[in-house]
Image (cartoon, rainbow, N blue to C red):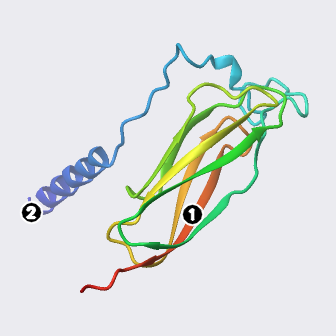
Amino acid sequence: MKTRSITNLMACALLLMTVSCRQEEKKLDASKISTDVINVPATASGIAVTPGAAPLMVFKEEKHDFGRITQGEKVSYSFVFKNTGGSDLVISSAQGSCGCTVPSYAKEPVKAGQESKIDVVFDSGGKSGLVEKTVTLVTNCNPSTRTLTITSTIIVPEEK
């Protein structure tokens, strides 16, 4: 009897943990992005993609150092990239590694041959010393994820 109660309790705990760890899926606005622009060669569709036809995201740089900044400063940087592939490039999400690193990007597809940018704002409040933060992008390129990195040395002002 006691074993059955423990088993039921463990099953309930497992169910509770599973439900509480789920995240809401972010939905794309179907009116802005057509599904026919998402043509990744590594899909299960079985449709062959001509080499060079897929989108390709090429950054001028994927790392940026803000240098020495004072604690509490907000700094920003634009990571410029070009779609050098043969079809539209779609960014489905950009996520900072913490709440202090906030990316923004154009929600419409980037046409082949066009440039665009990922703007990143970093808030150094409460931080000190050498800091490294990242922004993870999810796109319709292959590979589908890319990581941008920002670094800074944060100086704490002396109290008077």
Seen as rendered, the residue at the extreme top is: 31
The image shows residue 126, relative to residue 100, as above or below, that is: below
Q: Secondary structure at mark 1?
A: strand
| Residue named by callout 2 | 2
The amino acid type of the residue labelled 1 equals: Ile
The kind of residue on which mark 2 rests is Lys
Residue 36, percent from left and from top: 69, 17
Where in the figure is residue 72, as x and y percent of width and height? 35, 66
Is the Cβ of the residue at disc 1 closer than 8 Å to that at disc 2?
no
**Residue where numbered disc 1 is placed:** 150
Structural distance between the alpha carbons of marks 1 and 2:
55 Å
| Residue 121 point in image, percent of width and height | 47, 52
Give neighbour class at mark 1: few <14, some 14-19, many 20+ (Cα, 10 Å): many
Q: Nearer the viewer, residue 9 or 150?
A: 150
Query: Which sits in the foreground, 73 or 106?
Result: 73
Mark toward the viewer: 1 or 2? 1
Instruction: Indicate the secondary structure of the residue bearing disc 2.
Output: helix
> Which residue is found at the position 63% from the left and 19% from the top?
35
